[in-house]
Image (tube, helix red, strand yellow):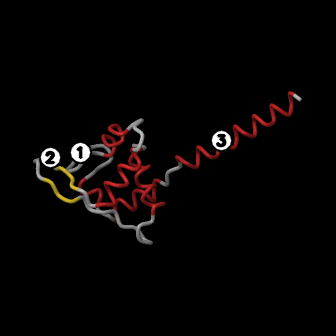
Amino acid sequence: MKKSIRSILTMTALALSFTTGAAVAVDNDAATSLARQNNCLKCHAVDKDKDGPSYKSVAAKYKGKAGAEARLIEHITTGEKAKFPDGHEEEHKMVKTSPAKDMVQIKNLVQWILAQ
């Protein structure tokens, strides 16, 4: 009896680890490629502020916050206003994917940003 319970617990732990790992696995190369294709790195950098905040500061701002991924997806897909250091505002460029509006690519980019 004890052996079967241990076996069930081990299998459950393994299943959870695969599920959790898949949820947070980020394709860094695909994310940076998408960021380059969309000229994100013109205004943002990983570790220093430019016209836009660094991705490290974005990740720090949203660390542990519920809805962080959804908020960033909204920001990069809707063209909402972005504030610049000099105080002016412009519509944030919308991230384009191929195929169009591919949420897998968009989520990967956002998860990459949040992982910085």
Query: Marks 2 and 1, Cα distance to the nearest angstrom?
Result: 10 Å
Query: Marks 3 and 2, Cα distance to the nearest angstrom?
Result: 43 Å
Query: Marks 3 and 1, Cα distance to the nearest angstrom?
Result: 37 Å
Percent position of residue 27, x then y: 49, 55
Dot 1 lies on which element?
A: loop
In this picture, is 25 found above or below 35?
above
The quarter holding residue 77 reads bottom left
Percent position of residue 44, x then y: 27, 51
Residues 63 and 56: in front is 63
The quarter holding residue 94 reads bottom left
State left or right for residue 37 relative to residue 25: left
Q: Give the mark, 2 or 1, whose residue is nearer the N terminus.
A: 1
Question: Where does label 1 land, which residue?
Answer: 49
Q: Which corner quadrant holds the C terminus?
A: top left
The quarter holding residue 17 reads top right
Q: Are marks 2 and 1 in contact (CB under 8 Å)?
A: yes
Of marks 3 and 1, the one in the foreground: 3
Say which amino acid is labelled 2: Pro
Say which amino acid is labelled 1: Asp
Question: Where does label 2 land, which residue?
Answer: 85
Q: Which mark is residue 16?
A: 3
What residue lies at 59% left-to-right and 43% top-to-bottom?
A: 20
Circle 2 Cα neighbour tier, 10 Å, few/some/many (<14 / 14–19 / ≥20) = few
Percent position of residue 103, x then y: 45, 61
Dot 3 lies on which element?
A: helix
Q: Which corner quadrant holds the N terminus?
A: top right
What residue lies at 32% left-to-right and 64% top-to-bottom?
A: 38
Circle 1 Cα neighbour tier, 10 Å, few/some/many (<14 / 14–19 / ≥20) = some
